[in-house]
Image (cartoon, rainbow, N blue to C red):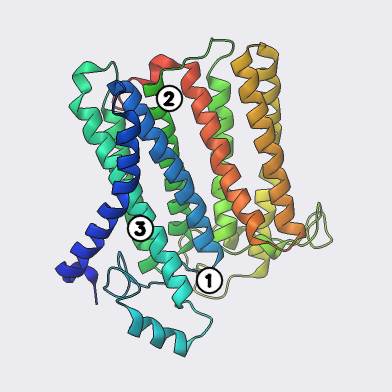
Amino acid sequence: MDLAHDPASLLRLAALAVTVALAPLSWWWLRQRGADSRARLAALTALTLFLTFDLILFGAFTRLTDSGLGCPDWPGCYGQASPVGAGAHIEAAQAAMPSGPVTWSKAWIEMVHRYLAMVVGLLILVAAAFAWRIRARLPHSPWWALATLAWVVVQGLFGKYTVTLKLYPAVVTLHLLGATVLLLLLVLQHESFANRPLSRGMARRPVLLVLALVVVQMALGGWVSTNYAVLACRGFPSCNGQWWPAMDWGHAFTLLRELGRAGHGGLLPFEALVAIHWTHRLFALVALTALSWLVLRLHRVGDVDHRRYARWLLLLTLAQAGSGLSNVVLDWPILAALAHSGGAAALAGVLASLAVRLSPQGAAHSPAA
């Protein structure tokens, strides 16, 4: 049953999301009730940013546990607001295929991911309404908050089609990148509301360049993950005992194809998976070089805040290299995979924060400006 055609279940799902969202909203309201409007908005976006980072991690956990089709419809589970109401369907599916894709645990993992996404969406809605209501009293534009609200709707559609198109690799990768865009939009808002500009010890353009390289590397990593190509290359630093293994580049980066299938409909060759993995490794060298260069530039500025960013970027870069290596040599343990996903998001967020703080005036303009 499609939940969209069952108003009662749809209302129960909405009521559940609102009830859960009231907990972080109440905490924010109580802690910030004596603060000014700018501080309250900064705190709300910081809270939303924290939950969005958690959502990215839980999305990775959902993917890594093969729970993406734990509830094969959207936004509910077999037309119900929770797996509890869908018990008969889940029992039947699990009896037919005990390992999934539908089991009790996978259904709950998938629905918790959706509940968290709904909570983040509601917090973004509250932040956008608050920003618009006080727009005349603050030297900032509410358009970024509205753009974030629009983007979270787009991200929800990516989530829908991830399920209804049965983990179509291009859609799943776009869903991952969409979460990164959402994270960056929230970082931009938080830093603009917090109003903590850095001394202009360096230009913003190098930071944006490195951020772009990190996002490209995240896209390649997402393509590795959504095509299950992590273990296509065994060993390090070589791949399957070779420095330049046999690779099928054409099939590897054919975007319009189903999971495990080539563009013509046949099975995806193993050499394509090798090409996907090896490309991610090669571009990692580019990203690591760029990050190391940026760390050195920040350290040379000499300012305390610049050096603090340099330390954070260095630690995150080293952790990211270590978790990526662990995925290969330890055969993709779930903790290392989660650390790798979280580390990439954290790197992007820190770089975005640095870029905004180096150009405080730029963050206050509207996206249409």
Q: Residue at x 59, y 10 (%)?
A: 201
Of the two numbered discs 3 and 1 in the rendering, the one whose residue sits closer to the viewer: 3
* Distance Cα–Cα, label 2 vs label 3: 27 Å
Query: What amino acid is found at the position of numbered circle 1 in the picture?
Result: Arg
In the displayed structure, 82 sits above or below 349; it is below
> Element under label 3?
helix
Near mark 2 (Cα within 10 A), the count class, few <14, some 14-19 or many ≥20, is many
Residue pictured at 19% horizontal, 18% vertical: 136
For the image, the number of numbered tags is: 3
Q: Secondary structure at mark 2?
A: helix
Residue 93 relative to residue 318: left or right: left
Residue pointed to by mark 2: 191
Q: Quadrant of residue 227?
A: bottom right
Q: Are marks 2 and 1 in contact (CB under 8 Å)?
A: no
Q: Nearer the viewer, residue 94 or 18?
A: 18
Mark 2 or 3, closer to the camera = 3
> Contact, CB < 8 Å: mark 3 with mark 1?
no
Query: Of label 2 and label 1, which has the lower sequence position?
Result: 2
Query: Residue 229: x, y in percent?
Result: 63, 62
Residue 78 locus on image (x, y percent): 31, 75
Mark 3 and mark 1: Cα distance apart in space? 31 Å
Residue 217 in sight: no
Q: Residue at x 64, y 57 (%)?
A: 335
Task: Check residue 115 in the rendering and tell me which mark sits there, or answer none.
Answer: 3
| The N terminus, quarter of image | bottom left
